[in-house]
Image: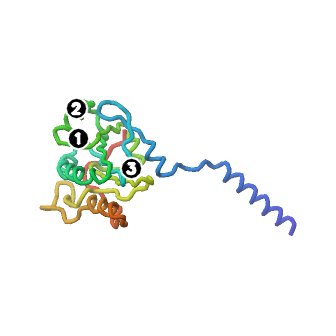
Amino acid sequence: MKRTILLILILLLLSTITCAETKPSQSPKSRLHNAELPNLKGKKAHPVEGKGRKASVLLFITPDCPISNAYAPEFNAIVREFAPKKIAFSLIYVATELSGKQLEKHAKDFGYVCPTFVDRKNSLVQRVYARITPEVVVILPTGTTAYQGKIDNLYVDFGKKRHEPTERYLRDALVAILEGKRVTVTRTAPIGCFIPAP
């Protein structure tokens, strides 16, 4: 009996020591809000804005992905509609060896109207587990992901699309956030180009 009690006390002591020595993992907020990337001029900044914002939207693209390029008009329309409503937008170029000037030209050619960054080492890609371009991630001020996936369901498969989308996932998520409602569709499988390892 005494031996059993002693064994229990030793196990409790060991578990307490283990818990005390375990470093707490980063919260979603610090994990994302601490992320820094260079913009197209090479100046580092935080693409995930939380202060005074209802949400932050990240769009991951590659300049040579035809589906990414095809979505430029719709994404720009969403930025123009929702940016005045305290939604922050950032465009993230990934998996590219193009220079800042070349990316500036691409952004200008496609009329992007939000802050633009370059993630050459996939640091932010890995933090949000993005894998396809184009892929959007909607992040709340708490650092949690409210929605991740495709902008809408225009594309059924690579090279196959509808005449017009029947589901507008990004728009619906942003409207729900602004109305203080729960986002009903939180994840969809994006269709486009795979993001290669750096």
Q: Few, some or many C-alpha atoms within 10 Å of disc 1 (few <14, some 14-19, many ≥20)?
A: some
Per the model, the C-alpha gap separating discs 1 and 2 is 10 Å
The image shows residue 17 at horizontal and vertical percentages of 71, 52
Instruction: Kindly identify the amino acid type of the residue bearing the numbered disc 1.
Output: Pro
- Does residue 27 sit above or below 64 in this rendering? below
- Which of 56/54 is in front? 54
The image shows residue 69 at horizontal and vertical percentages of 19, 46
Left or right, residue 138 beside residue 21 = left
Look at the numbered disc 3 and give the secondary structure of its residue: loop
Answer with mark 3 or mark 1, whichever residue precedes in sequence: 3
For disc 2, the marked residue is 102
The image shows residue 118 at horizontal and vertical percentages of 32, 37
For disc 1, the marked residue is 63
Residue beneath the point at 47% across and 52% down: 28
Q: Few, some or many C-alpha atoms within 10 Å of disc 3 (few <14, some 14-19, many ≥20)?
A: few
Q: Nearer the viewer, mark 2 or mark 3?
A: 3
Count of numbered marks:
3
Quarter of the rendering containing residue 181:
bottom left
For disc 3, the marked residue is 52
Residue beneath the point at 19% across and 48% down: 72
Marks 2 and 3: CB-CB under 8 Å?
no
Q: Residue at the left extreme?
A: 163
